[in-house]
Every structure is written in C-alpha cells, then in structure tokens.
Image: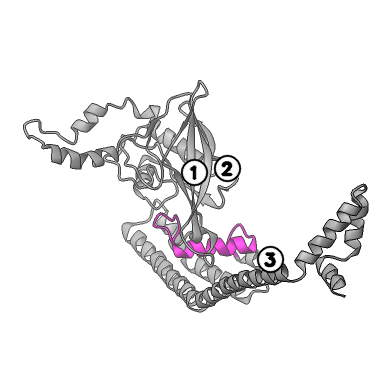
Amino acid sequence: MTKDDARSDQHDHGNADDFDGGRGDTAYPTWTDENLRRHMELRKVFGPARHGVVDGVEFDLRHPLLDPEEWYTFIIGGTPYESHSPLGPLLWFPWMGAFDEAAFRKEFFPDDDVAISAEEAAEIEPIIEQYLPEQFVYAGDKLVIGQVNCVVVGDAFDHLHDSESRNAYLNIIRADRTVIEVNEPLQFIGQSTTSSFHGIRGHYEAVVWRILKHFGLRELSAASVDSNESAERNEHASGALYQALDIQERIGRELQIDFSNDATSSEIIRAREKVQLVNHAVALGYLWAKAEDKMKMQPLAEVSLRVKSGGERGGRRSGETRRERRAKTWERHARELATAILQRDNYDGRLATIKLAKLGGRRVVARRLSV
C-alpha cells in the first residue's frame, strides 16, 4: 500500500480498513513511513487477526461472538482529534503524542480579543467534549474485550447481518494489572449487511457473499459453481448462484480496472459507474423481495402472535376454573384420605407413600370416596 492508498483508505468511511472509521478527523496525519507502518499493523489487528502489538500496546479483540469471517469493525487509534462516534470509543494512544487539553480548547477560541459569553461557552462545551479522549492508553497496556452485547436493528425475518450489530466493550489492562473499563463500545457490523450506512459492501457484493456462504464456496467461478451446485434443491438459490456468476463474468474487467494503477481517469469513471449500476439493480430486487415478504409474512406472524396470546389468556382462565371446581368437589376428600393414611402408617413413610400411589392419584381417590 502506498501513502496515497493509505490516505484514500482513511478517507473512505465505507471501507472495513478505515483509518478512523469515518469520524471526520480535523486533519490528516503526516504520512511518514512510520505512520504508514503503524497503519498497516492496525489494519491487521482490527481485521482478521484481531490480535497483535502496535508500538508497545497489545490488542486482543478475539471473542467467540465476533468471528472475523462474520463480523468486522473499524480501526480506532488511527488519528488524533477524532470525534466520538457510534462506531467506537475515542482513546488516546502513545503514538499520538502528548495531549494538551488547554491548547486543544484554545483552538475553539482562537481570537483572544473576542469576548465569549457564558452562554456561548456553554453551547461550545458539548462540541469540545466530543473530541476529548475517554481514556488514555500507554505503552505496556493491553486492550481486551470484556463484554459483547447484541443490538437488534432488524427483525426475525432479516438475515443475521441485517437484524443485528454487536457492541464490544473494551477493558484497558494496565501494566500493574489495574483494569479500566471503557464506556463507549466498539461496534461490529455483519460482513454482508445491506442495512448499515457503514457496510463495507454494496448490495451486489453483499448478496454474493451470502450466496457463497450458503454453498460453502470460497470464490465465484465456473469451476466452483459446477462442482457444488448439483446438490442444491432450492431452485431460487441455484438460480441466484448462476446469476451472480453471469454478472461476475460481465463486470469482472471493470472491477479490475477500478483497482488498477495504469487505468485512465475515464476508464475508472466508466467502470465505477457500471459497478454502481449493478449495485443499484441488485438493491432494487433485494429490497422489493424483502418488501413482498414483509407484506405477506408479517400479517400472518401478527395473527399467530395474537392467537398465541389469546390461547395463553384462555389457558389461564381455564386453569382458574379447574382449580375452583377442584376445590369445591374432590380435593377436600382426597386430602382427608391422604391425611388418614399418613397418620395410620406414620411408623413407615414408605408404606404410606406406596398406599397413596396405589390409589392412582387425586381423581381416583375422589371417585372411590364417592362410591
């Protein structure tokens, strides 16, 4: 990756390898070789590896609920003066240098000759607090995940990546073993989400990701499709697989042009437009399919829930009626008989239990007493 690539990587908030997760930092860092090296190491840590040491700070983001193949997150600690965001906490790392809060606050009041009223200062304070670090991380510290919470963003009919995201709450373990809890979570988003603004894939790539996952394929190619499709019984899934392969073969060159270094500007623009058009077309079909499912399935689901709720209420009323009838009829006689047996055979508890069992239960006892 070149320095220009890294700068572009930082600027594109839709990329899983974002330098700052789209927080809108106030200024780009100076892209020295040292910054580039650190950025690449952070990409590995917040990417598939989820573990590593960067400039003396150890990261361990491994967790059974955050499979890297299913869930991705954004880099934190990339640039100073990031604002707080739903994507992750604002932590100040040693490579950011010394944090001078007084100097930082002065940036919001640069003109000493202009008087600021108390009301104006109170309005600016929440803005300043958005850029103040929640915690400071030092060399020798270790960042680990203390807890993971699932956040529901869709419903039960959605794909898992569209129905929920996951918040990881970090702990900072100091060199002296002191544990500091970080309040703001680091958000993890499904690899194939189509509902999040911060998704790393367009609709076409997201749907293809799900198709490959369904068929257990690592890549979309004619050879892999022919070897795996024969066992599929779902004709819709089978048809989608071949449609994806056809689209891939048609726009494959455009995808390559988009990332090539020798392509002209006009070629890149045309390629991106074609890929974008495919994404829009897939989004149209996917969203309408979800709309049809919702129109057909949701009313049925709501009726089912109402029936279930009514059944539970009816069951409770029926149970109350049975208890009242039982109390007025055979229950009192059964209790009297059971007490008599226990008193007569109190020398042998097992014998009393056997005699009661032979009576066949309370209803049998009541019938025998009524004879």
Q: Are marks 3 and 1 in contact (CB under 8 Å)?
A: no
Magenta includes 212?
A: yes
First in residue order: circle 3 vs circle 1: 1
Quarter where residue 138 is shown: top left
- In this view, the residue in front, 116 or 248, is 116
Q: Are marks 1 and 2 in contact (CB under 8 Å)?
A: yes
Quarter of the rendering containing residue 186: top left
Q: Nearer the viewer, residue 112 or 349?
A: 349
Residue ranking furthest to the left: 113
Q: Nearer the viewer, residue 140 or 261?
A: 140
Question: Which dot, 3 or 1, sits closer to the camera?
Answer: 1
Q: Which residue is mark 3?
A: 227
Counting from the top left corner in percent of width and height, residue 251 is at 46, 66
Q: Is residue 293 visible?
A: yes
The total of numbered circles placed on residues is 3
Residue 192 position, x and y percent, is: 50, 58
* Residue highlighted by disc 1: 168
Question: What residue does disc 2 label?
Answer: 63
| Residue at the spot 62% in from the left edge and 69% down from the top edge | 316
**Quadrant in which the N terminus is drawn:** top left
Q: Amino acid at mark 2?
A: His
- Is 267 inside the magenta-drawn segment? no
Q: Amino acid at mark 1?
A: Ala
Q: Secondary structure at mark 3?
A: helix
Spatial CA distance of label 3 from label 1 is 39 Å
Q: Amino acid at mark 3?
A: Ser
